[in-house]
Image (tube, rainbow, N blue to C red):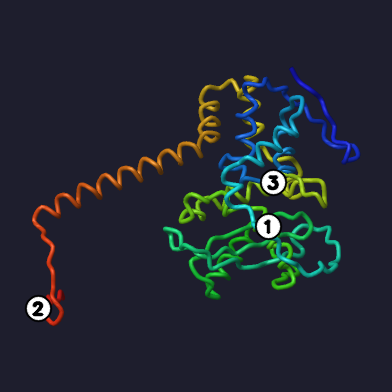
Amino acid sequence: MYREFMSPKVENGKLFRQLVVPEVYRSDVMKLAHESLMAGHMATRRTVYRVLSEFYWPGVESDVKRYCQSCDICQRTVPKGKQVRAPLGKTPIIDVPFRRVAVDIVGPLVPVTDKGNRYILTLVDYATRYPEGVALPSIETERVAEALIDIFCRVGFPREMLTDMGAQFTSNLMSELMLKRLCAERPRDWDKYLGPALFAYREVPQESVLFSPFELVYGWPVRGPMTILKELWTREITDPEVRSTYEYVINLRERLESTCELVKQNLEKASRKQSRIYNRKSRSRKMKVGQKGIGATTY
């Protein structure tokens, strides 16, 4: 069963053809919309939009709100206090994508990732709010320049590039990306999740413009996990090979988590075994104060 819905916020806006979800499957939809690899633990409003883009059931907004509020990771990483901010100044409205961009460097982040990254170069387009982000091990001029050139090769060279003046845009971006929430349990891997976190931000409409950054840059809504889930359930995807590929993407986060847990268990097991073997021919040595010893030096 489907429900057709048109957003009252946008004149001549998009017509949503929503699949009505039975109660038994609603938690699966909310989990995919909020916790999945490409969902990014976004706030209630954006999670609601993500669900309503493809699905509907009576009381959906209340259910999503309760789901987000009860999310364990969100509860443990939500800011505990509010910082007083200076009033936001006015900037000219830009209507050409990537004519003016805000650039900032976030970090150093602790701990350093396994790849040695501790900074994020962030770039946000003023017109579309489209974000870009690059993980960096250092902020040496050459590294930052290379990262910017890499971004400009995709979006073009801006006419204006703001740094300190663009802090409002980039700080909002980092708070929305929810990297801390996304990687709360494995902070040394946040650079692996930067791409999916950027996707989550690009996918949902921005309140100020009522369209998603992806739609404003490319001209159509992005095809994301919610669309794929709907098509899998309604059998719109009939090719078995394509179905298996999409199911793999949707279940990727769970597989990554289970794999990391298995690796952790295997490492702990190996560590205990190595300790047992090494300690068979070892004994504790007690040194007295003032006792002389000979130290070995390896060249």
Relative placement, left or right, of 255 versus 173 is left
Which of the marked residues, 3 or 2, is nearer the chain's N terminus? Answer: 3
Amino acid type of the residue tagged 2 in the rendering? Ile
Q: 105 or 158: nearer the eye?
A: 105
**Could you say whether the residue bearing mark 2 is in a helix, strand or loop?**
loop
Residue 135 spot, x, y in % from top left:
53, 61
Q: CA distance from mark 3 to mark 1?
A: 13 Å
Is the residue marked by circle 2 packed among few (<14), some (14-19), or many (20+) residues within 10 Å? Answer: few
Residue that appears at 66% across and 32% down = 227
**Could you say whether the residue bearing mark 1 is in a helix, strand or loop?**
helix
Q: CA distance from mark 2 to mark 1?
A: 58 Å
Residue that appears at 64% across and 30% down = 29
Which of the marked residues, 3 or 1, is nearer the chain's N terminus? Answer: 3
Q: Which residue lies under the disc numbered 3?
A: 43
Residue that appears at 49% across and 49% down = 185
Q: Nearer the viewer, mark 2 or mark 1?
A: 2
Q: Which residue lies under the disc numbered 1?
A: 173
Which of the marked residues, 2 or 1, is nearer the chain's N terminus? Answer: 1
Q: Is residue 115 above or below residue 59?
A: below
Residue 207 spot, x, y in % from top left:
80, 49
Q: Which residue lies under the disc numbered 2?
A: 294
Q: Is residue 153 above or below residue 274?
A: below
Determine which quarter of the picture holds residue 121: bottom right
